[in-house]
Image (tube, rainbow, N blue to C red):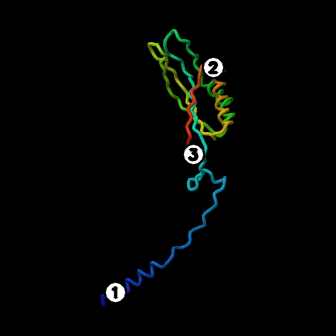
Amino acid sequence: MNLLRVSLLAAVLALSACTTLAPTAPAQQATAAMQGDAARPSAAQGWVRSELYFGVGEESGPADRPQAEPISDAQWRAFLDKEVTSRFPDGLTVFDAYGQWLFRGAGEPNRLSTKVLVILHEDSPQRRADIEAIRLAWKQATGHQSVLWSRQTVEVSF
């Protein structure tokens, strides 16, 4: 009797291994309308993360160094709208930061509130020219000597 039960159990297990699961819904083709869908993200290659550092606050430091005038929030937003968003309408990120540096031979560092502008963009001559135009526009508008530009290649997915 035990042998019969074991044989029947083995037969049932063997037959159950031969069954198939119910068919699943067919996979949808990814389209441009599906970009950003968590199940089917769209990856992009050849992109760069550009960070631009803009001094905006009241500069403190040695009295013998010329100090830049602070930039108001309204001036900053106007600059973003005119010079940055017009060139990079797909989006950007701004962080508030603090920076300091020590001029050679100075006894104390200069300190300055800073805005860090982050733009993810295609790595192309046009995009690099757009970044340079933003840097030049800031220096002309504020009289600042420089805008730090940091670039690194990135992998992005939307």
Residue 136: x and y, percent? 65, 25
Circles 1 and 2, Cβ within 8 Å, touching? The answer is no
Q: Residues within 10 Å of mark 3 (few under 14, many from 20)?
A: some
In the rendering, which numbered label is found on residue 5? Answer: 1
Residue, far left: 2
Which residue is under mark 2? 142
Which residue lies at the image location 65% right of the left edge and 28% below the top edge?
134
Element class at badge 3:
strand
Q: Do residues under tags 3 and 2 come within 8 Å of each other at their CB atoms? A: no
Residue carrying label 3: 156
Task: Point out residue 152 in the picture as x, y percentages from the top left corner.
Answer: 55, 37
Tell which of 76 and 19 is nearer to you: 19
Above or below: residue 141 compared with residue 28:
above
Amino acid type of the residue that numbered disc 1 sits on in the rendered structure: Arg
In percent of the image, x 60 and y 64: which residue is there?
Answer: 27
For residue 130, side relative to residue 152 (left or right): right
What residue lies at 46% left-to-right and 17% top-to-bottom? 109
Say which label, 3 or 2, has the lower sequence index.
2
Q: Earlier in the sequence, mark 1 or mark 3?
A: 1
Quarter of the image for residue 9 reads bottom left
How far apart marks 1 and 3 lie (CA) works out to 59 Å
Q: Is residue 8 left or right of residue 55?
A: left
Q: How far apart, in angstroms, are the residues tagged by discs 1 and 2?
A: 90 Å
**Is residue 122 shown left or right of residue 3?**
right
Q: Give residue 133's quadrant in the image.
A: top right
Residue 63 point in image, percent of width and height: 50, 9
Badge 1 vs badge 3, beta-carbon distance below 8 Å: no
Secondary structure under tag 2 reads: helix
Q: Is residue 33 above or below residue 78?
A: below
